[in-house]
């Protein structure tokens, strides 16, 4: 039933201003104008990400959004690290770590957190 409709990643944040700076300036997403208070929409490729003010920001302990990286994921990770993004390291079975990039077979992934602790993933296969 929903297969023909676009989905939007929705991420709770404590401070819209701080989140806007992070998603726009640090991650390089394009801001989409909105008149709704406490909400900011961003464009990322053909997708959209909605961040909204919530008292529950950062309480999700799982990945909130994933970017599919074409090409060299390590270049994306190095570029974000140069902007102050810190990447998480996880002890995952069957996975090796190359710098900040986890490798499992042909899949490469890296995880970081936004200012509220929401987990964001970059994946390349």
Image (spheres, rainbow, N blue to C red):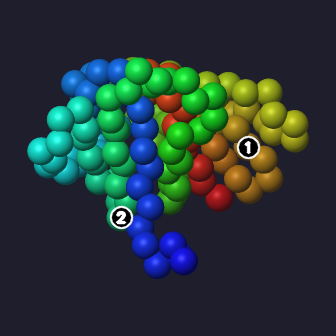
Using the image as rendered, state which of residue 56 and residue 47 is in the foreground. Answer: 56
Can you see residue 112?
no
76 relative to 125 in the view: left or right: left
- Packing grade of label 1 (10 A; few <14, some 14-19, many >=20) is some
Q: Position of residue 101 (x, y in %)?
A: 64, 36
Q: Is residue 26 above or below residue 47?
A: above
Q: Which residue is mark 2?
A: 46
Q: Quadrant of residue 18?
A: top left
Residue 103 appears at what percent x and percent y?
Answer: 73, 43
Answer with left or right where residue 26 lies relative to residue 121: left
- Which residue is at the front of the view, 101 or 68? 68
Q: Sort mark 2 into few (<14), some (14-19) or many (20+) by Cα contacts within 10 Å.
A: few
Check disc 2 and report its element: helix, strand or loop.
loop
Q: CA distance from mark 2 to mark 1?
A: 26 Å
SS at circle 1: strand
Residue 5 in view: yes
Q: Residue furthest right?
A: 94
Q: Residue shown at 29%/21% (left/top)?
A: 15
Residue of label 1: 103
- Residue at the spot x=34%, y=45% of the render? 50
Q: Earlier in the sequence, mark 2 or mark 1?
A: 2
Q: Residue at x 81, y 39 (%)?
A: 95
The C terminus appears in which quarter of the rendering?
Answer: bottom right
Q: Which quarter shows the N terminus?
A: bottom right
- Does the residue at mark 2 contact the one at mark 1 (Cβ under 8 Å)? no
How many numbered marks have been drawn onto this rendered protein structure? 2
Residue 69, position as x, y percentages in the image: 51, 54
Tell me the residue at 67%/25% (across/down): 89
């Amino acid at each position: 039933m929903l297969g023909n409709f676009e989905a939007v990643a929705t991420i709770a944040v404590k401070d819209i201003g701080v989140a806007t700076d992070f998603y726009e300036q640090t991650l390089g997403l394009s801001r989409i104008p909105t008149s709704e208070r406490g909400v900011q929409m961003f464009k990322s490729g053909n997708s959209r990400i909605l961040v909204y003010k919530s008292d529950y920001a950062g309480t999700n302990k799982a990945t909130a959004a994933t970017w599919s990286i074409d090409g060299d994921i390590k270049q994306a990770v190095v570029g974000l690290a140069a902007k102050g993004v810190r990447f998480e390291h996880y002890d995952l079975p069957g996975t090796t770590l190359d710098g900040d990039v986890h490798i499992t077979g042909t899949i490469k992934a890296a995880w970081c957190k936004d200012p509220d602790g929401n987990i964001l993933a970059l994946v390349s296969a």
